[in-house]
Structure formats: structure tokens, C-alpha cells
Image: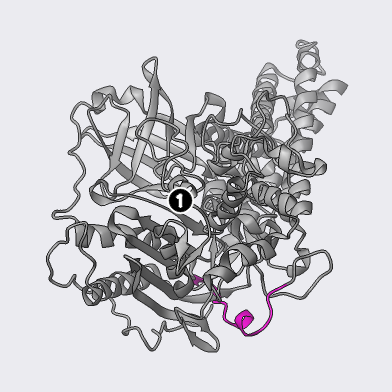
């Protein structure tokens, strides 16, 4: 469910926009009985020759190398626990746990027993259930999803011409907006809802025709899962157990969650396995802080999977085996080919989507497929490399584990199968001269459009693209600054990361890039118009604060002549003073809320909260008063020479403040900040 880091990294952004500056004990990470003690730095790669594609990995050398990468990542990125498995040519060649699943009491990670929350890797199981119905002829990939849904869950056209197809859901090109705050995850199991009820209550807006651009959608996958439920007549958890986990012998893999049984919900997870879940952690004040359990059952097809490294090893062997493992066939060769072949590619040269699996580009041009997973605290990655007969799975129980989970599969391929480092092309001296093609501010297609959540997304869902004089393209966003070099010349529109196989692909027409596709293919970024410039919002926010402060300070600094006023001027002045107080209060409340969002989990669970709703309500009233004040400006200027009227200087100051408040309020309205009833 990757966009959580984007949604939650907003405290600093909010404070920057509004111009405000508004302890736990250290827990020692311990390795389990099968893992070496953690070192403060990565172990050096053991000596060994590079392998040809047909040669298998040497288990001892692989283990030593993975130990070094994992222990180094745990130390540098503050990760409490990691679980890893590697398979090749039908054999498990590495299966290991590192660190702890629980700190109180201390419980080491066991690769065969400890369940990690795998988040969006769940989707690959969902697509297997969909493809099995395709094999049986009960679902068509090109069929509208509405054919397979009960009437109350069917997707409305909302003014769009084309229906949303199963294929569009599978390739994340459904055209839905993406929302997560306050409803994607729950910390209170009493708030869990049936899947069908969740889909009905949280239906997103359609924002573009289906099939056009990628925009990763948890809702879309859950909708596909509900289609299978409707066709088969089984609840989703039972369906996965009957058709996948039980036949494969995945005894520690489940979509069920440990909670109390409730009427109307699928049966919970009970028995010994319910006590084998890893806790989730964040690094805070020099120690690991345990987070409350995550509940995702209300959108199970998109993210409720929990499993072990041992079970995921068997799952990877199924994927590498074309749908068959130990004589048990789960899906046929046509489906296996669909999982390994791009079904949709947003731009030539960009990373695409297979039948629900992500196309993955590895060092040296090696092709793979798989899926990543991001929940509140867990980070996971599953990568299948058919040409090497290789599968790599890794999961961490701490929110800082994203870099390690991405790196490990890449580093294994690079270390053992690439004769030299897979260096990117050199920077282009011509790029800076062509920078007008690419430079600008871009907004992701994967965001909320409107509402208060859309307002927050405007701060955190963008990328600023710039070219440097020494020939690099830079992108600045939630992942800090990354550097890219052109592939095939400065005008090609294709860029390669300087430190990974990731690529950016721009769609250039009429001498300017209108959008680019992100490195992992889950979303596109569209060039933002001038009204959606973060710089514009920052500028207007600062001006509004200055005007509000000036208005309030001016009450005590006016000379006697400035107290002469008409009745209309008196009323207008009172309205403007009220606006100033409300704008300052609203900004302060947003700042207080942002300052309290150090733990991003609180944003996901508790959105929007009283601070945000009150700030939005105050902004709405302030904007309404600004509109009325703007209408009253001609009356304020009348009778300029009368003794009982304002001076020309005060009229000018009043007019300037009115225009600032009106412009700032209009911008807030366009960005979705002043609709508290649609958070």
C-alpha cells in the first residue's frame, strides 16, 4: 500500500507553508538463535566468482552476504526485526530471521513462525483468485467490473464514457482518486467493517477515463476481490484458504486477523498462530516504540495478508513453477505467463504492470516481477526473477525498513550475477541547455482530488524537477533529492537513477514534458498548473499572516484621524478584523496539529481530528467574510473627502488586505481546505 509515507510526512510541509515554527528507553535489538549477532556495519562481501545465469547461488556465500546487508541496514536504519527467504530452482537456499518480533517480552524473529504484515503483497493473492475465475470463464479481463458486482457496489459513470474493466483494476488504470487517511487502516478492531460495507461507504471519485494513466488504487483491488466474492459466493478469507493457502500447505499464511468474533465479519484468527504476529515499531527518541496492532480486514484483498518467510518461500516457488508446486496446480500456464508479461505500459520504456504484478527492472537489465508492501509499520518486498530461477522475499517490522527491503533483491542480483557494477550512463552536458523540456512542479496521479485530504496531498504528493549545470536531472519530493542521468541523449525523455536501476520516463510533446511515470510504475506525475504551485501557496500564506498581524496591530497604532469613519467603513473594518483573527487561529490550529503528527500512524488512524476540522471551519468563515468585504469595497471608498471618512492611506491599506485575504481564501478553496464536512 505504498503511499502511506507520502500521506503521513506532512507535519514539516504544513509548517513550511504557513510559515510557523509551531521517552522511551532504548531497546537492544537481538538476533534469533539462527542469526549472527548484529554488527555495527555491513560485513564485507565474501570472495567468489560471478555466476552465469544458469549457475545456482552458493548458499554459504549468499548467507554471509545477506547477513552483512541486513545487519548493516538494521543498524543504520534502526530496524527491530527482519525476516528473509531466498529460493532458486525449486529449493530454499536461505531462510532466516534477524532481530526481534517483540521487545516485551523479548521474542526473536522465527522465519517459520513469526508472521509479518505484508500489506500490498496481499494483492498478488487477490489476482490469483481473479485469474482462476478467468480460467473458469466466469470473469473476463475485458469485462466491466460492474458485471460481477452486486447492484449497490457498481461503479457509477460520474460523467465518464468508458466503464471500469477488470483489466483496468489489475493494471491500476481505473481512474480512481486515492484516499487513505482515517479509513485505510484501523487500530481499534471495533471499527472493522465488512468488505462490501467499506466499498460502499468509501467509494472514491473517478477523476479520469480508465486505461489512460497509472494511479495505484487499494480501492480498485478490493473491488476486484469483492467481484470474486460475488461470483463464487464465498467470503474472501475462506476463498483464499480453499484455493491457495491450504492446497499449498501455507500453514502460517492468513488474511484473518486476531480480534474478537463479530457478527457480519469474517471469522477472526484464533489458536496458537494468533500469538505469532510480530509487533510493529517506530524508532523514536533513541529507542523502539511499539505501535498498536494494525487492522486491515475491512479491505482485505488489498492488504490484510500476514505470513512468514518460510511460507513465502513456498509461494515464490509456486510463482517460479508456473502455478504448480509439489504436484499441486493452483493456476494454469496461461495465467503464469500473464503474471510475468506486461499487460499495460504507460509510456514506452517505462515500468509496466503485468496481470497485477509489478514489472521490476534489476541491475544489468535483468527482468523480474513481484510486489512491494507498505503498511503503518511493516515494509516488505517480493521479487521473482524467472531467468535466474530466483525468488527473494524480505519483510521488516519497523517503518524505516523501506530502503533495506528495496535494496536486498537488487544487491543479490548485482553481487552474484553481474561481472561489473551496473553503472548508469554518464551525465549529459547537453541536459542543462534542454532543461526547459523537463523542469517544473509535478503532482502525482495517486492522490485525493479535493476534500481536506486532497489539501494535505497537495503539499506531499509532488515532485520538483530541476536540471543541474553538470548534466544531472534532480527530483525532490518525499524521498528527498534523487539524481538521474539521461539514457539515449538529453532529448530522449528517459532517465536512469545514479544509484539504482530505477528509471523515469517523460512524455514530451510540443517542446515540453506534460507528465512522467515514476520509477516503480505505480503512478504518473502530471505537470502542475500555476494555481497548484506550492510556492504560490507559501507566498500567499506568508502574506495572509503578515496582513492579519498588521490589521490587529494597526488597531492600537492609528492616529485620531483614522478613527473617523462612515457606518459602512466601521462594519467593513469589524469584518476584516474578524477575518484576521480567524485566519491566524486557523493557521495556528493547523500548526498545532502538524506539530503533533510526529508519529505518522496518528495521521492515518485519527484523521481528520478536531484541530483540522476547527481550522477548516474557521478558514471557511474567514473566506466568506473576505468575499463580503470585497463586495463592500466600493462603499468603503465613497465620500473620500468627507470629514467622517477614512483617509486615502487607510483605504489603500484596507483594500490591499482585503485582496490578500480574498486571494488566500480562494486558493484554500481551490486546494480543498475549507470544506470541513468532506474531510
Label 1: element kind:
helix
Q: Is residue 131 magenta?
A: no
Above or below, 511 relative to 216:
above
Q: Position of residue 138 (x, y in %)?
A: 67, 45
Residue 17 visible to the viewer: no
- Residue drawn at x 36%, y 37% is 504
The image quadrant of residue 511 is: top left
Q: Which quarter of the rendering shows the C terminus?
A: top right
Depth check, front residue: 278 or 454: 278
> Crowding near pointer 1: few (<14 within 10 Å), some, many (20+)?
few
As drawn, is 187 to the left or to the right of 247?
right
Count all numbered tags in the image, as a single digit.
1
- Residue drawn at x 53%, y 79% is 24
Q: Name the image colouring.
A: one colour
Q: Position of residue 128 (x, y in %)?
A: 55, 54
Above or below, 670 relative to 54:
above
Seen as rendered, the residue at the extreme front is: 327
Above or below, 6 relative to 389:
above
The image quadrant of residue 532 is: top right
| Segment colored magenta | 268-285
Q: Position of residue 424 (x, y in %)?
A: 21, 43
Question: Label 1 belongs to which residue?
Answer: 333
Depth check, front residue: 165 or 407: 165
As drawn, is 437 to the left or to the right of 402?
left
Q: Is residue 272 magenta?
A: yes
Q: Which quarter of the rendering shows the N terminus?
A: bottom right
Depth check, front residue: 468 or 37: 37
Q: Position of residue 463 (x, y in %)?
A: 44, 39
Depth check, front residue: 430 or 25: 430
- Residue drawn at x 34%, y 54% is 386
Amino acid at each position: 500500500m505504498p503511499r502511506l509515507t507520502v500521506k503521513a510526512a506532512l507535519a514539516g510541509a504544513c509548517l513550511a507553508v504557513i510559515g510557523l515554527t509551531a521517552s522511551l528507553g532504548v531497546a537492544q535489538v537481538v538476533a534469533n538463535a539462527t542469526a549472527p549477532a548484529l554488527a555495527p556495519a555491513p560485513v564485507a562481501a565474501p570472495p567468489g566468482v560471478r555466476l552465469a545465469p544458469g549457475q545456482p547461488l552458493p548458499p554459504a556465500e549468499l548467507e554471509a552476504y545477506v547477513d552483512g546487508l541486513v545487519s548493516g541496514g538494521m543498524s543504520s536504519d534502526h530496524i527491530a526485526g527482519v525476516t528473509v527467504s531466498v529460493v532458486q530452482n525449486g529449493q530454499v537456499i536461505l531462510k532466516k530471521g534477524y532481530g526481534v518480533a517483540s521487545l516485551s517480552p523479548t521474542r526473536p524473529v522465527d522465519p517459520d513462525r513469526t508472521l509479518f504484515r505484508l500489506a500490498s503483497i496481499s494483492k498478488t493473492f487477490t489476482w490469483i483468485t481473479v485469474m482462476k475465475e478467468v480460467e473458469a470463464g466466469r470473469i473476463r479481463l475485458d469485462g466491466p467490473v460492474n458485471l460481477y458486482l452486486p447492484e449497490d457496489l457498481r461503479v457509477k459513470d460520474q460523467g465518464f464514457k468508458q466503464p471500469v474493466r477488470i483489466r483496468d483494476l489489475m493494471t491500476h488504470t481505473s481512474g480512481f482518486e486515492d484516499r487513505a487517511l482515517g479509513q485505510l487502516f484501523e487500530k481499534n478492531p471495533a471499527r472493522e467493517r465488512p468488505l462490501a460495507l467499506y466499498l460502499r461507504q468509501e467509494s472514491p471519485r473517478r477523476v479520469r477515463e480508465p486505461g489512460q494513466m497509472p494511479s495505484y488504487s487499494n480501492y480498485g483491488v478490493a473491488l476486484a476481490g469483492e467481484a470474486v466474492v460475488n461470483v463464487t459466493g464465498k467470503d474472501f478469507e475462506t476463498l483464499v484458504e480453499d484455493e491457495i493457502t491450504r492446497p499449498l500447505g501455507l500453514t502460517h499464511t492468513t488474511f484473518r486477523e486476531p480480534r474478537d468474533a463479530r457478527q457480519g465479519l469474517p471469522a477472526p484468527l484464533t489458536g496458537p498462530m494468533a500469538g505469532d504476529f510480530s509487533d510493529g515499531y517506530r524508532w523514536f527518541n533513541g529507542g523502539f516504540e511499539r505501535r498498536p496492532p494494525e487492522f486491515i480486514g475491512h479491505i482485505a484483498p488489498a492488504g490484510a495478508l500476514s505470513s512468514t518467510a518460510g511460507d513465502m518461500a513456498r509461494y515464490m516457488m509456486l510463482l517460479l513453477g508456473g502455478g504448480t508446486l509439489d504436484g499441486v496446480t493452483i493456476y494454469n500456464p496461461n495465467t503464469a505467463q500473464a503474471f510475468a508479461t506486461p499487460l499495460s505500459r504507460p509510456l514506452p520504456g517505462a515500468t509496466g504492470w503485468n496481470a497485477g504484478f509489478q514489472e521490476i527492472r534489476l541491475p544489468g537489465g535483468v527482468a523480474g516481477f513481484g510486489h512491494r508492501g507498505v503498511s503503518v509499520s511493516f515494509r516488505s518486498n517480493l521479487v521473482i526473477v524467472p531467468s535466474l530461477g530466483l525468488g527473494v522475499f524480505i519483510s521488516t517490522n519497523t517503518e524505516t525498513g523501506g530502503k533495506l527491503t528495496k535494496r536486498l533483491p537488487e544487491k543479490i542480483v548485482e553481487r552474484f550475477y553481474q561481472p561489473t557494477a551496473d553503472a548508469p550512463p554518464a551525465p549529459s552536458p547537453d541536459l542543462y541547455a534542454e532543461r526547459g523540456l523537463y523542469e517544473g512542479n509535478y503532482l502525482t496521479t495517486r492522490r485525493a482530488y479535493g476534500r481536506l485530504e486532497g489539501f494535505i496531498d497537495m503539499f506531499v504528493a509532488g515532485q520538483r524537477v530541476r536540471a543541474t549545470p553538470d548534466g544531472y536531472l534532480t527530483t525532490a519530493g518525499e524521498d528527498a533529492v534523487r539524481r538521474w542521468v539521461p539514457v539515449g541523449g538529453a532529448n530522449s525523455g528517459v532517465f536512469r537513477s545514479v544509484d539504482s536501476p530505477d528509471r523515469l520516463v517523460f512524455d514530451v510533446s510540443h517542446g515540453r514534458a506534460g507528465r512522467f511515470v515514476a520509477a516503480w510504475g505505480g503512478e504518473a506525475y502530471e505537470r502542475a498548473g500555476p494555481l497548484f504551485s506550492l510556492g504560490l501557496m507559501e507566498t500567499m500564506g506568508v502574506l495572509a499572516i503578515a496582513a492579519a498581524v498588521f490589521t490587529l496591530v494597526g488597531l492600537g497604532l492609528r492616529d485620531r484621524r483614522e478613527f473617523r469613519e462612515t457606518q459602512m467603513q466601521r462594519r467593513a473594518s469589524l469584518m476584516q478584523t474578524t477575518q484576521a483573527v480567524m485566519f491566524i487561529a486557523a493557521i495556528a490550529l493547523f500548526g498545532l496539529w502538524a506539530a503533533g503528527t510526529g508519529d505518522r500512524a496518528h495521521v492515518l488512524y485519527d484523521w481528520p481530528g478536531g484541530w483540522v476540522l476547527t481550522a477548516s471551519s474557521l478558514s471557511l468563515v474567514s473566506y466568506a467574510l473576505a468575499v463580503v468585504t470585497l463586495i463592500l469595497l466600493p462603499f468603503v471608498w465613497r465620500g473620500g473627502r468627507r470629514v467622517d471618512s477614512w483617509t486615502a492611506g487607510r483605504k489603500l491599506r484596507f483594500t490591499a488586505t482585503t485582496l490578500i485575504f480574498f486571494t488566500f481564501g480562494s486558493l484554500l478553496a481551490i486546494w480543498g481546505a475549507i470544506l470541513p464536512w468532506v474531510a
